[in-house]
Image (cartoon, grey):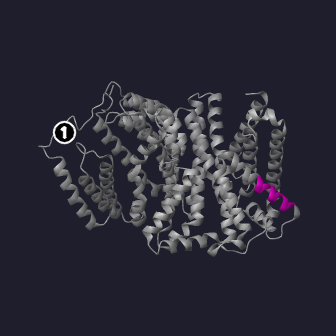
Amino acid sequence: MGRLDKTRAWLGNGAWLAAVLFVTTVQPLYLLPIEQQLPITLMLVMVGLFLRRPLFRSERLARVGSVGVAIDLLLVVASVVVGLYVALNYHDIIFRQGAFTRADLWISLIGLFLTLEAVRRSVGWPLTIVCLVFVLYAVYGRVMPGALLHRGYSIDRVAQHVTLSYSGIYGIPLAVMVRYVILFIVFGALLQASGAADFLVRFAQVVAGRYTGGLGKVAVVASGLVGTISGSAAGNVATTGSVTIPAMKRSGYHPHFAGAIEAVASTGGQIMPPIMGAAAFLLADYLAIPYIRVVTAAIIPALFYYLSAGFAIDLYARANGIRGLSKEELPRFWPTLRSGWIFIIVIALVYGMLIYGYSPTRAAFIGVVAAALLALLKRAGLRASLDVLIDGAKSAAILCAVTAGAGIVVGVVQLTGLGAILASALVDMSLGNVLILLVLVMVASIILGMGMPTTVVYVLLAALVGPALVDMGIRPLAAHFFFFYYGVLAAITPPVALASYAAASIAGSDFNRTGWEAFRMALPAFIVPFFFVLNPALLLDGTPGEVIHTSLSAGLGIWLFTTAVMNWLRGRMSVWTRLLLFAAAFLLLDGGWRTDVIGLVVTCGVLLLRLRPGRVTTNEEVPVRSAE
C-alpha cells in the first residue's frame, strides 16, 4: 500500500470513528436536535466512504493519473458542504417546504447524487440500481403502464422531496440508525474488545459440549450468544466461526456441514433477543411500539430457530457417531463463570433496562459506558480497543449509507403513492387468499434479501407490502415480523447465501454444498412465520394458556419436521414414514386442539414402529465416524 493509500485509509477511518463517537456522545445526551444529527452523521460517513473506497483502484491510478483522486476529494468537499448546509439551516428548511430557494435546489440535487454514489461504494450496484429505478419511476410516472401510472414529477421536485423533506434520505431509516443502532454497535464492539466473545464460546462449551454432537451444539449456543451483541450474520460467522468450524472438523464433522452449522447459527443472531439486528429497531419505529414488544415477540420464533438447528445437529451426530466432549476436554463451570460473569451482568443490564421500559437509546448508552469501563478493567489495550471500534464504525458507516439509500425509496413511495398501488395489486394477485399473499411476500423478501442488507429489505417491504398484509386482516406486528424474518433467512438461502459462503471459506468446503446444507438444516425455520402469522400466540400475542399450548405443540412439530428433513430416527426412514412425520408436524404447528390430537396420534404411531424394542439399528444404517 502506497503512502497515498495509507493516508486515505487513516483519514477515512478517522471520519468513520468520528461519526460513531459523535452519535455516541450527542444522541444520548440530546446535545443537538435529531434534524442536525442526521446530516452531520451522514456527512462523516460519506467522507469516510469517498476516502476509504476510491473511485479507481490503486493499480488503475497509474493510468488515469490524479483524476480519480481529484474526483474523490471533490466528493468529500461536496459532502461537507451539503451536510453542514442542511444541519445549519434545518429550521428554515422545515418552514420552506414547498417554497425552496435556489440554493436549496442545488443542495438537494447534489445530496441525491452523493447518496447514490455512497450507496454504490458501500454495497455495490444492486441497491444503487433499485434507488435509481425508483427515482426514474417518480420522474416518468406519466408513461408508466396500468396501475403504475401517476402524474410524474420533475427531477428538481423529486430531489427536494427525498433530500429536504425529512421523509427520504434523512427519514426514519437513518434516524433509527442514529438513535439506536450505532449505540448498540459500539456496545458490541467494546464488549468484544474486552473478551466477551471468547468467554461466550467457552461458556457455550460448558453448557452444550457434553451432549451428542458436542462442538456442533457449542457452535449453535456460542453463535446465538455472540449474535445478541453483534446482530450481523457474516460478522458473527467471522467472529465465532474461526474458532468453532476448525474444532467441529476435528471432532468428526464434514467440512461442509461444519460450515453450514455456523452459517445457520450465526444468521439467527439477527432474530435473537435482546439486541437483534438493525431492522428490529426499524420495526419498532414503523409500528410506533416499544422496542421491548419486538423483543418479546421474537423470543419464541428465535427459540424455534435454534431448536431446529440443535435437533438437526443431534440427528446428524447420531447418524455419524459423533459424541460429546469428554469430561477432561470440557472447561470447568465455576472457573469459566468466574472468568466472565461480569459480561453476563453487562448484557443482562441492557436487557433488564429494556424490560423495565427504558428507551433503547438510554439502555444502549448505559451499556456503552459499562462496556467501556469493562474494557478498561480487563486492560484490553488502547490499540486493540481502537481496532475493534474502527471495525464497528465501518459496519455502522455502511449501514448508514444503505439506510440513506433506502430513504430514497421510502420518499418516492410516499411522493407517488406507490405503496397503496402495490398493496392493491398484491391483494388482487392473491385472489383474496391470505396464504397466497404470504407466499408472494416470502418470495419477495428472500429475493431482495439475497442482494441487500436486511435493514434495506425491511424498509422496502414495510413501505410496499406491509399495507397489503394488514389490509388482509393480519395483525401489524405479525405482518411486519413476517417479512423481517424472511429478510434475515435470505443470508442462508441459495444461490447467494452470503453467511454460508463466509462459513464455507473458513471451513475450506464447497460453497454450493455448504449453502444447500445450511438451507436444509434451517428448513423448519422457513415454515414458522406462516404459523405465527396465522396464530399470533407464537408472538406472545394471546392468553398465557394459548401461548403455552401453541408453543409446546409447535415445538414438537419443529422436532418432527427436522427429523423428517434430516431423515434419521434410529436409522434411515422410508419415504412414507417421512411423509407421515411431515404431515404430523404441520398438524401440530397449526395450533388447534383437533389438529394437535390428530398430529399426536400420527406421531405416536410412527414412534412406536421406529422405537420398538425388537428393532435393532445396524452398522450398515449408521456410518460411524470417529470423534478423534
Q: Is residue 465 left or right of residue 166?
A: left
Q: Is residue 548 left or right of residue 427?
A: left
Quick check: 363 above or below 583? above
Q: Main secondary structure of the magenta part?
A: helix
Segment colored magenta: 103-113
Residue for point 35% across, 25% down? 329
The amino acid type, in three-letter code, at marker 1 is Thr
Q: Nearer the viewer, residue 314 or 368?
A: 314
Q: Is residue 104 magenta?
A: yes
At which x and y percent is residue 297? 45, 58
Residue 31 showing in the rendered view: no
Query: Does the rendering let one see residue 495?
Result: yes
Q: Quadrant of residue 585?
A: bottom left
- Which secondary structure, mark 1? loop
x, y percent for residue 104: 84, 61
Snapshot quadrant of residue 10: top right
Q: Is residue 435 above or below residue 335?
A: below
Q: Is residue 437 left or right of residue 385?
A: left
Question: Which of the pair 494/17 is nearer the observer?
Answer: 494
Q: Quadrant of the N terminus?
A: top right
Residue at the outermost left position: 614
Question: What residue is shown with label 1?
Answer: 617
- The verdict on residue 269 being magenta is no
Numbered-mark total: 1
Please name the residue shown 32% across and 28% down the image. Answer: 627
Which image quarter holds the C terminus?
top left
Residue 425 in percent (x, y) is at: 55, 73
